[in-house]
Amino acid sequence: MLKLSGTFENSLGKMHHWSFSDPNKDLTSAEVRVQLEKLSELALFEKDGAQLFTHVTSAKFVEVIETPLF
């Protein structure tokens, strides 16, 4: 399974991690950055009085390999 993992700075200056399953892996890094910046402009998410997505700092694709044990 492929995931897009983004790191954002919240309004208190602390890092906040977010991930999205099954992203479009054909997007360029610039296109991914634009979309994540749009998320930070919306100011939709808040926890304990802090906006969670105020500035995107990094993003990466993460491939998760699941191995059933039984």
Image: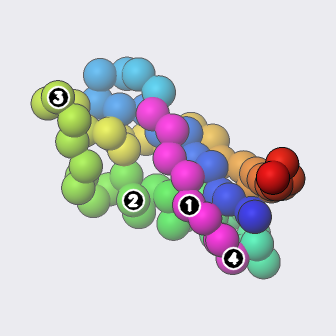
- In three-dimensional space, the C-alpha distance between marks 1 and 4, rounded to whole angstroms, equals 10 Å
Q: Residue at x 23, y 55 (%)?
A: 44
The answer to if 11 sits in the magenta stretch is no
Q: Nearer the viewer, mark 2 or mark 4?
A: 4
- In three-dimensional space, the C-alpha distance between marks 3 and 4, rounded to whole angstroms, equals 32 Å
Q: In the image, residue 7 lies at what x, y percent?
A: 55, 39
Q: Relative to 70, does residue 30 appear above or below in the rendering? A: below
Q: Nearer the viewer, mark 1 or mark 2?
A: 1
Which label sits on residue 20? 1
Q: In the image, residue 68 lies at what x, y percent?
A: 82, 54
Tell me how the rendering is colored. Answer: rainbow
Q: Nearer the viewer, mark 1 or mark 4?
A: 1
- In three-dimensional space, the C-alpha distance between marks 1 and 3, rounded to whole angstroms, equals 23 Å
Element type at marker 2? helix
- Amino acid type at circle 1 is Phe
Density class for disc 2 (Cα within 10 Å; few <14, some 14-19, many ≥20) is: some
Which label sits on residue 39? 2
Secondary structure character of the magenta stretch overall: strand
Q: Which residue is mark 4?
A: 24
Q: Residue at x 21, y 42 (%)?
A: 46
CB within 8 Å, label 2 to label 3: no
Foreground residue among 66 and 44: 66
